[in-house]
Image: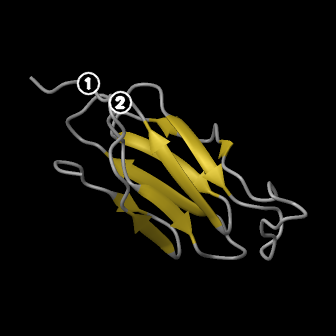
Amino acid sequence: MRGCRRTVRGRRTHPVARPRAPGRTPAGPGRSNLDAEEPAEVTLDLRGRAVGEPTARLLTADRLHVHNSAASPEAVVPRPFDGVKATGQGLVLTLPPHSFITVQAPLARTR
């Protein structure tokens, strides 16, 4: 994202680029926590832009080796995640172990 500085605190997080959705401005790229046991705190630093109410979707499972199959096609599916907090500087969230998240938030226009 142009003009967006991201700061990640935590272990083994990985940025993942994703395309912009029409009519929405993403607050940052998707993030994954590759650690199998520890959560990771992530801060998306959006200085200079006011952030609206964020929405997020989380992809994870209760156990590390759970996967989708013909017998359980929805063992791992994206679910709403309400653990994203808007701050004066951007967004803060804590990713559960072995998870992937996408976040969207409306950004105020710059003048």
Q: Position of residue 18 (x, y in %)?
A: 38, 55
Q: For residue 56, which quarter of the picture?
A: top right
Checking the image for residue 51, the label placed there is 2
- On the picture, is 5 further left or further right than 75? left
- Residue at image position (55%, 53%) is 101
Of residues 91 and 34, the one nearer the viewer is 34
Q: Position of residue 88 (x, y in %)?
A: 35, 33
> Helix, strand or loop at disc 2?
loop
Q: Position of residue 110 (x, y in %)?
A: 14, 27
Mark 2 burial class by Cα count in 10 Å: few <14, some 14-19, many 20+ = many
Where's the C terminus, which quadrant? Answer: top left
Mark 1 burial class by Cα count in 10 Å: few <14, some 14-19, many 20+ = few
Residue with the mark numbered 1: 108
Furthest-right residue in this view: 71
Q: Is residue 77 above or below residue 25?
A: below
> Helix, strand or loop at disc 1?
loop
Q: Is residue 53 above or below residue 21?
A: above
Q: Is residue 74 above or below residue 27?
A: below
Of residues 32 and 76, the one nearer the viewer is 76
Q: Residue flagged by tag 1: what amino acid is it? A: Ala
Of labels 1 and 2, earlier in sequence is: 2
Q: Position of residue 31 (x, y in %)?
A: 48, 60
